[in-house]
Amino acid sequence: MANNKKKNQQQYQEFAKQRETKRPLIKNCIRAFLIGGLICTIGQVISTFYIHFFHFTEENVGNPTVATLIFLTMLLTGFGIYDKIAQFAGAGSAVPVTGFGNAVIAAAIEHRTEGFVLGVGGNMFKLAGSVILFGVFSAFIIALVKTILIQWGGL
Amino acid sequence: MLTGQRSWKFNNKPVIVSTGTTGGPFEAEGNISKDIDLLHNDLYMGEDSFEKAHKILLEKAGQKAIEKAGISKEQIQFYLAGDLINQITPTSFSAKTLGIPYLGLFGACSTSMEGLALSAYLINSQGADYILTGASSHNAAVEKQFRYPTEYGGQKPPTAQWTVTGAGTALLSHSGDGPVVTSATIGKVIDLGLNDPFNMGGAMAPAAVDTIEAHFSDLGVDASYYDLIITGDLGQIGQQVSLDLLKQHGVQMEESKYVDCGLTIYNKDQQVNAGASGAGCSAVVTYGHFLNRMKKGEFNRILVVATGALLSPLTTQQKESIPCIAHAVSIEAGGDRQ
């Protein structure tokens, strides 16, 4: 009986899968490449601007550039444009720092109605929190591997 | 009266004396905006949160139905309604405003027909003179609970569906002018193991098929008995899957009379991927669009099969599959044909 049920389910899953609209993978990849590239180009223009006009160096221009990009993301998210760009761009707008900014800002706006402390404070990192956690954790692992290799491997 | 395994036949012909529908700005640009009584041009509807706006949607739809019937709300005995938000709070708050004795329902997107079936049963058995029933959903409030923050940029796959901002209510009575409710079939929970919350149509299709087949066999009719068979929110994928399933089970169904509320409410230029969904979807489209067309005499008998996915964000994250249900109600043209 249980076996029969499982077989039924598998049959249906196969049946439904054949009729499912697939994600347009290649189209999505091309769009992600173009928009992701465009965002990086904008970042590069901002960097060059800061180096030329505000005497930043290539080493320390990263901070004001990221801050500017996140500021722009904040405007685009607040005015309801970023999610439309994202539907088109997919990973292209999710992977750059603007995607991270959008995840934090969108959550902050969304939970404003529940108050500043429990609403905004408690929920701001509900999407971005795992990016921070696993980002820091993987950096730790890589640093550990590097240290071990240098100490014992004599690299 | 119980007919067959799980259907009721309403011999006293409960009448839908009036309906009330509301929608949001996106619905105003849609295909059936003319059939919606009240359209809001702002998602917040003058409130300070989406949840409060959600409450306004249903409240206004209920008031509209009462106003159109020309009765006072004190004459209504019961209010049967529901929505998708945790603990169906928007509906409960609307019941507070309306001040009508209230039974809260949850059947996800099948709530509209769950409410209509129960209301018709109560009216049919002289349990009430007037009953108000309805369902509603608010795109941003539902997205917030079930998916991501509204402004979060996450790409949705082509199988995803767009939650309707809207509410539909119907006022039933034992006499009066209007379409009559003739029978109803209550659905079973069907779960064939699909677990992608971005493909609810595919998950719900077997539930719709199960209820349609049960309805036909309980009442001894077939698809040709109805002028239209209207599903709630199967969307493109669910509609195709259910049609093919019916064919596989040997049920004759003309494609031209098998329509879906989720594919009716928006026009082709609106990007909603596989179609619309939400508790408000079948309510707005049935009580607004299809009943209006019935009044104009375009068809006489319809079967509305509202489909619901009974999942929560928690069950999805715990890798549970999606339990689905569908309730069917048949409506026939009454004494107000033009």
Image (spheres, coloured by chain):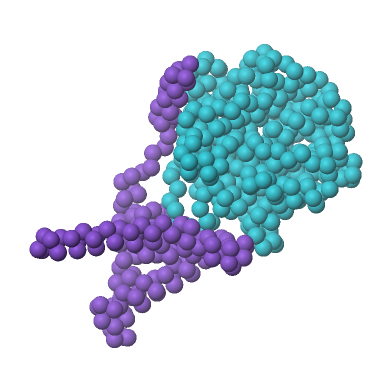
Left or right? Give the position of A71 relative to B164. Answer: left
Q: Which residue occupies 57% across, 46% down?
A: B163
Q: Residue furthest front?
A: A152
How far from the left and from the top, in percent, is residue A62?
A: 31, 74
| A95 shown above or below B235 | below
Give A134 or B17, whichever is nearer the viewer.
A134
How far from the left and from the top, in percent, is residue B109?
A: 62, 38
User: Can residue B237 be seen at all in this image of the molecule?
Assistant: no
Left or right? Give the position of B230 relative to B156. Answer: right
Q: Residue furthest left?
A: A154
How far from the left and from the top, in percent, is residue B298?
A: 69, 30
Give the position of the C terminus of chain B as an image quadrant.
Answer: top right
User: Can residue A154 be seen at all in this image of the molecule?
Assistant: yes
Q: Chain A takes which shade in the image?
A: purple
| B77 shown above or below A80 | above
| B60 shown above or below B295 | below
Q: Quadrant of residue B113?
A: top right
Q: Which residue occupies 56% across, 60% down?
A: A110
Q: Which residue occupies 53% across, 26% down?
A: B206
Left or right? Give the position of B297 relative to B75. Answer: left
How far from the left and from the top, in percent, is residue B244?
A: 48, 24
Give the chain letter for cyan: B
Q: Quadrant of residue A53?
A: bottom left
Give the position of the N terminus of chain B as an image quadrant.
Answer: top right
Q: Which residue occupies 43% across, 51% down?
A: B155
Q: Quadrant of residue B307?
A: top right
